[in-house]
Image: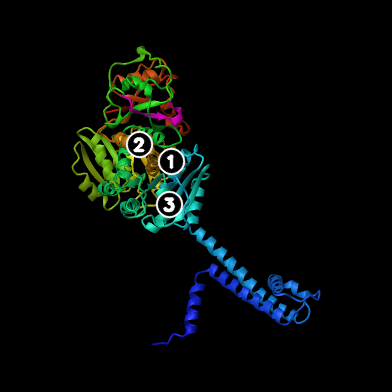
Amino acid sequence: MRTITIWDKVRYRFDNTMSKGAIALIGWLGLITLILIMLTALSLVVINATSPDGVQYTFGEALWQSLMRALDSGAVGGDVGWGRLIFLGMTVGGIFILSILIGVITSGIETRLEDLRKGRSFVVENGHTIILGWSPQVFSIISELVIANENQKDSCIVILAEQDKVEMEDEIRDKVGKTGKTRLVCRTGSPIDLSDLEIANPHAARAIIIPSPPTEDPDTYVIKSILAITNNPKRRPEPYHIVAEIREMSNLEVARLVGGEEAQLVLADDLIARITVQASLQSGLSVVYTELLDFGGDEIYFHEQPEWVGKTFGEALFTYEDSALLGLWKKEAGVLLNPPMDTPIHPGDKGIVISQDDDTIHLSGHTGEVDPTALLDADHVTRISARTLVLGWNHRATNIVNELDEYLHPGSKVTVVADTAEARSLVAAECGQLKHANLEFVHGDITSRKLLDSLNISSYHHIIILSYSDSLPSQQADARTLIALLHLRDIANQTRAEFTITTEMLEVQNRDLAAVTRADDFIVSNKLISLMLSQISENKELTAVFQDLFDPEGSELYLKPVGDYIALDTPVNFYTLLEAARRRGQVAIGYRLKAEARDAEKMYGVHVNPKKSEKVKFTDEDKLIVLAEN
């Protein structure tokens, strides 16, 4: 066994001190400098050294002059006698010490800057919004939150992900651009690690958004992130406002157990499947949903209107000129979309209102003029066509097929075409017991013109093209979708067949590129999920609204022929359309003009929450957007 000497102990303690970094080094340099100055001053006093003026140095004056020589090497030139040699030694020592000190400070600053670039410093924010994890939805979420925060003086978005801080900032700058009054703070760390999570300061956050990451098991990652917040030993006593994206229905119950009432969960695949199916059967519906979900146009608000007390829901529909009433929120019943028209409004009830902003919701002062001569009594029910073709494959395909079955009539047919190995077995296992439709699977490449010609495309009424998002990068998947779109449009031109095409796109910018194919509707899946997460992060009460709105069992949005509601020979205002829908137990919220269906600047003809007093002359191809049960 080695004998530990005093020198070993001294060196060990010195090494431990030096390992503490720049502060310890500066401390040692300061101590050495102080000792050197003291020795120099003492030597000057001992030898009775004198200044250039012939005055003998006192100990205090010697200390000061030694310090000056340590800081300024040029001061030694005027020294005389033996003091010159002593001051020379002090100056040489000072040069070495000062050089080391500059090097230590420079190194310390560089180390600190490098630490800052790593994004590991604590976020000193309050009332901020946190995004946990990195996914393609992040950019859309940030863009929407920036719009939502335009009227806020001091707003901040914090992103905590495992990516490099600088890389995240560069990518956000490229894809989002300027963020106005909203500050962006990126930090590097794992959202499921408690120590890393503390960096984002979740206990002072207003809302926490957890999008689904692009990994093999995204739901596990999301659930762990929720658990790290709700079961954190340092958690705050007040409930958190967490908005999380869940992919699989089977994981929803576990996420609810972990998040409780603090987590608002968005079942992404189920939601996109429902929107895709509804949009395929009703062209333009995805534009309506986008308009309601983004912060750029009209949004959904909860608003208490004391003047409604004593009125019915049907009467309250006509009290706004620039806003539209969707339903009611009652304390005992919660969200009621399109309730019975004779539902009474009590004190404390809130209206679920579509408006440009929360400060634009105000009574018009009149109930509007309805043209009774334009109203039609007969209620037309449009029957859904029975032959639907699904081209392409991703993990949402079986959900879409099952959702289609909820809307189709007995004897309908659904054909799925895909070239992935697992598609046939999954379709058979998860869609084998359809109630209304006969199911057929065809193995093949959806970009093959030969295959498409063999399918007798003209015999189908509705075609859905799904993105190969599970197996291909987004740009390659969208490229295959575009090729299939071009083939289908060419087939339609040659055969003069009438069928709708609903297309799932992954990248928003590819939607404009795909517009040349004149597809009837586009579903930008990542965008829609991002919009919903952003909306719920601003108002958690919207969770119940969206669940009801997309549930086939309740009232949903439909685009029905305007000619089923009013006579088309004269222009009418929207109050007249509102009354025509009210008589059928429906709520009219807008219309779609066929003449503008290809114009992106006019929202493809979709007008949500139009000014009710303006008159419009409709054609037999125009649609009324209504909230109805069927």
- The picture places residue 501, in percent across and down from the top left corner, at 35, 37
Query: In front: mark 1 or mark 3?
Result: 3
In terms of secondary structure, where does tag 1 sit? helix
Q: Residue at x 72, y 72 (%)?
A: 61
Of 2 and 423, which appears nearest the observer? 2
Q: Mark 1 is on which residue type?
A: Arg
Q: For label 3, count other residues whose C-alpha is less than 10 Å away and answer few (under 14), some (14-19) or many (20+).
A: some
Ranked by sequence position, the earlier of labels 1 and 3 is 3
Return the residue at label 2: 542
Query: In front: mark 3 or mark 2?
Result: 3
Q: Is residue 121 left or right of residue 210?
A: right
Return the residue at label 3: 201
Q: Mark 2 is on which residue type?
A: Leu
Region in magenta = 346-361
Q: In 3D space, how far apart are the residues under numbered discs 3 and 2 (Cα atoms)?
A: 25 Å
Return the residue at label 1: 511
Quadrant placement of the C terminus: top left
Residue 575 against residue 405 in the figure, above or below? above
In terms of secondary structure, where does tag 3 sit? loop
